[in-house]
Image (cartoon, helix red, strand yellow):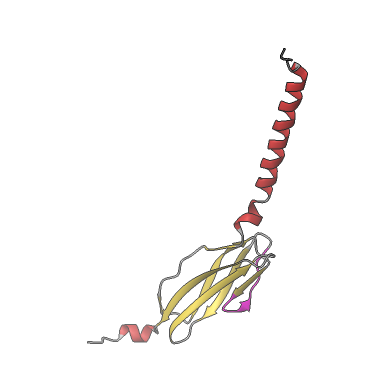
Amino acid sequence: MTESVPFRTVVKFAILAIGLLGVIIYLTFQARYLIIGPGISLTEQQTLLQNQRQVELTGSAYNISHLWLNDRPIYTDAQGNFKEALVLENGYTIATLRAEDRYGRETTVTQEFVYTPASFLEEKHY
């Protein structure tokens, strides 16, 4: 004959399974920052052609332990926002933002600029 499983045992296993599933979901939710790694976002995309010698790069970084602009360390506020001035060279300049998390994973964002003085833009070149 077949024995039937008591209803209490089924309920105990169901509660245990739901609890275990809840713990797994909670741990996955809390580990999301470890899973996605570091991130950088610029709030304003600057135009390629610039007639000002200095531009400001503003944005935010998250899940980072270190942040660099062209291999020079820069810092964020408590919310992860940064604002950094960059002096452009004559002609072509590349700004590279690089972030690293505490596990050594990196991400980079590059922004290109071409500096042309305003007097050069006003001249007519045929």
Main secondary structure found in the magenta portion:
loop
* Residue 111 location (% of width, % of height): 47, 72
Position of the N terminus by quadrant: top right
In the image, 124 versus 113, the foreground residue is 113
Measured along the vertical axis of the image, is residue 49 above or below residue 79?
A: below
Q: Quick check: 92 left or right of 37?
A: left
**Residue 74 falls within the magenta-colored stretch:** yes
Range of magenta residues: 69-77
Residue at 58 percent of width and 69 percent of height:
83
Residue at 58 percent of width and 71 percent of height:
98
Quadrant of residue 63 within the rendered picture: bottom right
In the image, 25 versus 76, the foreground residue is 25
Q: Quick check: 38 left or right of 117?
A: right
* Residue 75 location (% of width, % of height): 66, 70
**Residue 114 falls within the magenta-colored stretch:** no
Q: Quick check: 58 left or right of 45?
A: right
Quadrant of residue 86 within the rendered picture: bottom right
* Outermost residue toward the left in this view: 126
- Total labels: the figure holds 0
Position of the C terminus by quadrant: bottom left
